[in-house]
Image (cartoon, rainbow, N blue to C red):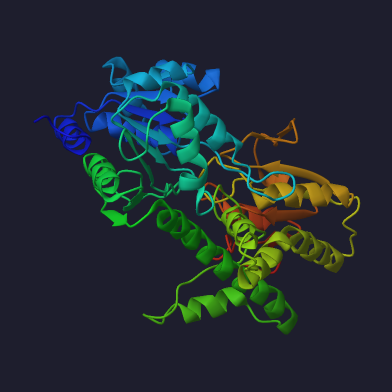
Amino acid sequence: MGLNMKEKLLQKIKDREIVVGVVGLGYVGLPLAVEKAKAGFKTIGFDVQAEKVRMVNEGHNYIGDVVNEDLKALVDSGMIRATSDFSFVKDVDFIAICVPTPLDVHQQPDISYVKNSSIEIAKHLTKETMVVLESTTYPGTTEELLKPILEEGSGLVCGEDFYLGFSPERVDPGNLVYKTKNTPKVVGAVGKDATEVIAAMYRAVLDGEVYEVSSPAVAEMEKILENTYRNINIGLVNELAMLCERMNISLWEVIDAAKTKPYGFQAFYPGPGLGGHCIPLDPYYLSWKAREYGFHTSMIESSMVINDKMPEYTVSRAAGVLNKQKKALNGSRVLVLGVAYKNNIDDYRESPALDVIEILKDRGAETDFYDPWIPKYKRGGEWHEGIEGISPEVIGSYDLILLATAHDAYDYEMIQEHAKAIFDTRNGFKNVSNRENIELL
């Protein structure tokens, strides 16, 4: 009697005979593709953007968490190639879907990338293939959306002919300790066999623990919990920042004192708003899905309201700093330092700094930005260019320096010495002793 699907796939994983497909070669997909290939699995990257396909095939890296030499060596050795042709799905045994899941103009989940990718995969899906969604989404997506599309488009049956699961990405751009390779992974699939085989595939590639859960929905909700947890706690400290400003108390000092407690407290910090590809978006996915069940996620929605108004609050505080200099925001020259959503990375997705700049300009401030990681950014179909660099003369020519992202590359002592006024939303100037021209969020 021949081997069944589970036994065949487990053997192919063990023998490194699995061909991997990764759909979406962005911040999640490219590092995953590189790790799969480094582990000895031939990998095909799929992306609708011809430029990304070209760069990968030339061995040119564009993602911070990928080592340039690794990608070049893998391309040269034939372990990785990229294409926009989904017909090559027929050649793969494992497919990871790593496409964006943004919000639309109504702040509702835009799962069109997931849907369209699934339709294309279904056309070429073959028996004994594992399909795993990694894109952050609402609980139920894998079984309610993907499963019917894949079954109807391929004529195959989930669980009998192919395995389907969800394993949320946990990419933290700029994290020097945890990368794709060593971050623990959660896997939930349709059926125990699917869970076992998909988990085995990740274990063959990653150093981090692979934790199995009972269903895709549990894994989908787990990812939402991770990021909603941060959203709520950041909302708490942002609200306290507003209160502490009125009470003339430094919240930063309060947090430093609180985090001396070795249990029961984790430090979160205020800022000009939330950024990145997960934390600002995930709560909207959950609250949208919750309404289907007649349930309102009141605590989550409250934190979203607070966090969403932080750019506006930041500009109001900036106007107050200028007011102390007997200057109006309208007509003042403001330099925003940093447009990345966190320090020491080149990622500006959902960055609150972009909202801050827009509001400053709407209020009549002559606003420029400087970010050593991001010379220009695109928003609303337009490119916005930053200034080329900062010097004592440049810093001194502005009425206000607003620190929106605390990159290590800034010379904080020089900036403090030559700035007329500084509004520090990230406590980046914490080690500068002379604080007479610095106001903290």
The image quarter containing residue 439 is bottom right
Instruction: Give residue 274's position: percent from left, percent from top.
Output: 62, 56
Which residue is painted at 57% across and 60% down in the image?
428
Count up the numbered dots. 0
Question: Can residue 438 be seen by looking at this rendering?
Answer: no
Quadrant holding the N terminus: top left
Q: Is residue 170 left or right of residue 254?
A: left
Relative depth, front residue between 27 and 296: 296
Instruction: Give residue 311's position: percent from left, percent from top.
Output: 73, 58
Which residue is painted at 75% across and 36% down in the image?
380
Picture layout, residue 438 above or below residue 364: below
Picture layout, residue 142 above or below residue 10: below
Picture layout, residue 375 above or below residue 281: above
Furthest-left residue in this view = 1
Which residue is painted at 33% across and 57% down in the image?
214
Instruction: Give residue 234's position: percent from left, percent from top.
Output: 58, 67
Q: Is residue 56 left or right of residue 298?
A: left
Which residue is painted at 28% across and 30% down in the image?
128
Q: Is residue 195 left or right of residue 222?
A: left
Relative depth, front residue between 18 and 413: 18
Instruction: Give residue 86's position: percent from left, percent from top.
Output: 46, 20
